Amino acid sequence: MDLHSRGSLMEATWKRYRQASKRAKTRILNELCEATGYHRKYAIGKIGRFEECGKPKEPTRRRKKSSYGPEVMRVVEKIWEEAGYPWSVRLKAIIGLWRPWIRKRYGLTGGQEAQLLRISPRTIDRALAGKKRGLRRRLYGRTKPGTLLRHRIPIKCEHWNVQTPGFLELDTVSHSGENAGGTFVYSLNLTDIGSTWVETRAVLGKGEEGILEAFRQMSAVLPFTVQAIDSDNGGEFINHHLFRHCENEKIGFTRSRPYKKDDNAHIEQKNWTHVRKLIGWDRYDTSAAVQAMNDLYANEMRLYMNLFQPSVKLIRTERRGSRKTRRYDAPQTPLDRLARMPGADQKKVEALLELRARLNPFELAAIIRRKLDRIWKLRSVRGTPKNEMACVESEIARTLSRNLGSQIGRPKTPSTGVSLG
């Protein structure tokens, strides 16, 4: 029976059902369910939505009373801002991790603290939906593929499946603003696939030796040994300097397919959360900017992101027909993952665990904001290529004007007006 026929049968049945006795109602309901395939409770509900005029009643939506007070929701919003606008599942884990410092900072009562710990990620999403719409921005990359040593560096495009730390993805983030000309700052970013640990350094330009030196600095402070790296096809990575370094240190070296950002999905995500989201899209092209960025990257930022910011890892993807459902593990900080993984440097991990117990994430966030204010003041105000071309055209016009002006007073032919000089 199609939808129209079911509606016609319902309109013919509801009056008779209303006027029937209890035993007759049972018989009418059995006939209706057998004809339409409805469940008994669903059929009773549809009959109940019809008024005397034969039209269905407008469903009355009962607004559920909020289980959380406005003060608790304001605290959730403040923590979300302080933590760098994380996903609700990660924010739920952050609330549990930051609980001692939240209690000191906001002075919550016992009941409010219990509500804060009980709040679900879905409730957080509903409460922050309006704020999130105002913060959406997109990230556009500028990396172009290189050509050196491609035939000697294998391509890796399958998913990483590692249980030990040391397998890294690398990428650079451009800080050129609207003008990609000249030399400007890049942020070299690396992330460990197993633990999600992230390190970042700023370099002026994409010189091969500068990128290699930054990679050496980051490798020295990692709480594990580098086993293999995977990069895109940019010339800052596909060069003899980095290739020889990996050969000497017994480090595996693979690359992604050209123009396939999904091959480096892990580092592309970190480019947004650890660099672009903080530094923005302005142009930086001075040594002072490099020093200010590295002062942030190598100190407070690495501690804040790796010790106090939980992240989730994709476990599997389930496909049902045309729909894909992604299943993630419980949110954990990179440090907590390292503490449970074989192959990590246990001395460094224990030292970092002791350091986390002494640090305050709110104080770290305040220092990061102050350093970001200093970095933003160092941005360069330089015209776009289009504006530069307009300046060049204006200079040419002024030069021509001066040349023409110098010819004033020379004799001209009466007919054409062209100088005879």
Image (spheres, rainbow, N blue to C red):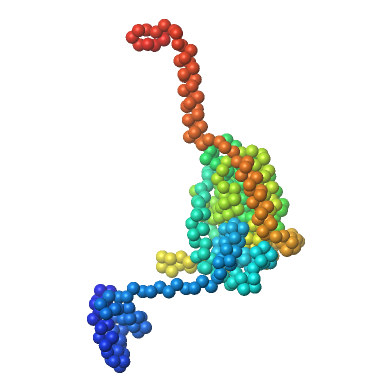
User: How many numbered marks, from 0 up?
Assistant: 0
Residues 245 and 171: in front is 171
Is residue 313 at least partly visible in the picture?
A: no
At 68% from the left edge and 52% from the top edge, which residue is drawn? Answer: 367
Is residue 290 at least partly visible in the picture?
A: yes
At 69% from the left edge and 57% from the top edge, which residue is drawn? Answer: 363
**To which quarter of the image does residue 380 belong?**
top right
Residues 242 and 36: in front is 36
**To which quarter of the image does residue 359 belong?**
bottom right
In this rendering, is residue 139 above or below 9? above
Quarter of the figure with the C terminus: top left
At 55% from the left edge and 67% from the top edge, which residue is drawn? Answer: 70
Horizontal relation, residue 63 to residue 143: left or right: left
Percent position (x, y) of residue 69? 56, 69
Percent position (x, y) of residue 113? 63, 70
Percent position (x, y) of residue 193? 61, 59
Quarter of the figure with the N terminus: bottom left
Residues 207 and 110: in front is 110
Horizontal relation, residue 246 to residue 85: left or right: right
Horizontal relation, residue 94 to residue 29: left or right: right
At 36% from the left edge and 74% from the top edge, which residue is drawn? Answer: 59
In this rendering, is residue 412 above or below 39? above
Residue most extreme to the top: 411
Percent position (x, y) of residue 267? 58, 54
